Amino acid sequence: MRDVRVPFTVRWNRDAHSATVDLQGTTVQLKEGGWSEWVRLEFRVNLLVRLRGMVQLHLRRATGDLQLYVSPVNWPPDAPVVPISAPASFAGELYEGLGIYRTLGLGGGHVAAQRGPARRAGVHGRTCSAPSTTARVSSCARSTRSSSISSSA
């Protein structure tokens, strides 16, 4: 199996401690220490198969040297390539009620944060703040489930 890649361009402004990242028609401006919103990507596997995903970018450092972290690719919750919830429609319902959210799970980001360049870049701080997102998803999940159950009963 071959790697599927998404090229991107980074313009580094050392004086402003910032960088601009261009990928697949999306321009993301980051200040040192800042995180992007979710960026949607399309991976062309071959002429017929395209997979969609989403990532977040973190500009760890823009002084001295440039350190840019790209999160693991998550499935978009409104159009996952495989079911990511049970029932399969539940991920979309959460998306409608909550907006975009992390679908890889905390483990994916946590593993990256504990090993290699991500750990040295200090990404573990972002992983530690993720439970607030998890709490919002859990809260939305409870309200969506109860309204779905009551409307079908």
Image: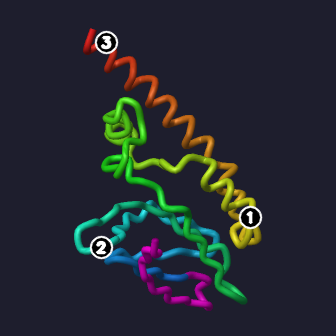
Camera-side mark, 2 or 3:
2
Q: Which amino acid does the dot numbered 1 rest on?
A: Arg
Name the residue beneath numbered marker 1: 115
Of label 2 and label 3, which has the lower sequence position? 2
Of label 2 and label 1, which has the lower sequence position? 2
Name the residue beneath numbered marker 2: 46
Camera-side mark, 3 or 1:
1
Say which residue appears at 39% left-offset and 78% top-offset: 23
Say which residue appears at 32% left-offset and 40% top-offset: 92
Residue 8 on the magenta segment: yes
- Real-space CA distance between mark 2 and mark 1, rounded to the nearest whole angstrom: 31 Å
Which residues are drawn in magenta?
Answer: 1-18
Asked which quadrant contains residue 14, the reply is bottom right
In x, y percent, where is residue 64?
Answer: 72, 89
Q: Which amino acid does the dot numbered 3 rest on?
A: Ser
* As drawn, 23 above or below 101: below
Name the residue beneath numbered marker 3: 150
* As drawn, 33 above or below 10: above
Answer with left or right where residue 65 lies relative to residue 79: right
